[in-house]
Image (cartoon, helix red, strand yellow):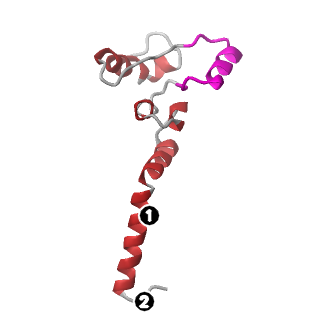
Amino acid sequence: MISNKKEKSNWIKIILFDIRLYMKEIIIFLMVVFIMTNQLSKSDSPYLLAHADNPVDWYEWSDEAFKRARKENKLIFLSIGYSTCHWCHVMEKESFKNREIAEGKPGGN
């Protein structure tokens, strides 16, 4: 048990240091648990992580993506978006963040 204010203060500093040290991992974990809905949540890429909360079930370029496409007999939609591309942001806002479009329902607005 912590007995005095100085000792409490030292423990708080240690805990805060540990939290800062692992902040990226903590944030990613919390985002995965509470926000993210697609495979990009597993990425290390800041660009891909920016799209991990889209309802579209994006995958990184991988064998897993191709296996799933084959299994479900679906085409692959390849996005080569670039973070400073205006139209990439328009597509994300108007389409990729739209749950109805992500679910393949026509006319989603």
Residue for point 38% across, 21% down: 92
In the displayed orientation, state which residue is furthest to the bottom.
3
**Disc number for residue 18:** 1
Q: Disc 2 marks which residue?
A: 3
Q: Is residue 59 left or right of residue 3?
A: right
Q: Quadrant of the C terminus?
A: top left
Whether 60 is among the magenta residues is: yes
Asked whether disc 1 touches disc 2, contact meaning CB atoms under 8 Å apart, the reply is no
Mark 2 Cα-neighbour bin, 10 Å: few <14, some 14–19, many ≥20: few
Amino acid bearing label 2: Ser
Q: The magenta stretch spans which residues? A: 58-76
Q: Position of residue 71 (x, y in %)?
A: 71, 17
Residue for point 65% across, 25% down: 64
**Disc number for residue 72:** none
Q: Position of residue 19 (x, y in %)?
A: 42, 61
Q: Where, by quadrant of the figure, is residue 65 drawn?
A: top right
Residue 44 or 86: which is nearer the viewer? 44
Amino acid bearing label 1: Asp
Residue for point 45% across, 85% down: 2
Q: Secondary structure at mark 2?
A: loop
Q: Position of residue 48 (x, y in %)?
A: 45, 30
Q: Secondary structure at mark 1?
A: helix
Q: Is residue 95 left or right of residue 33?
A: left
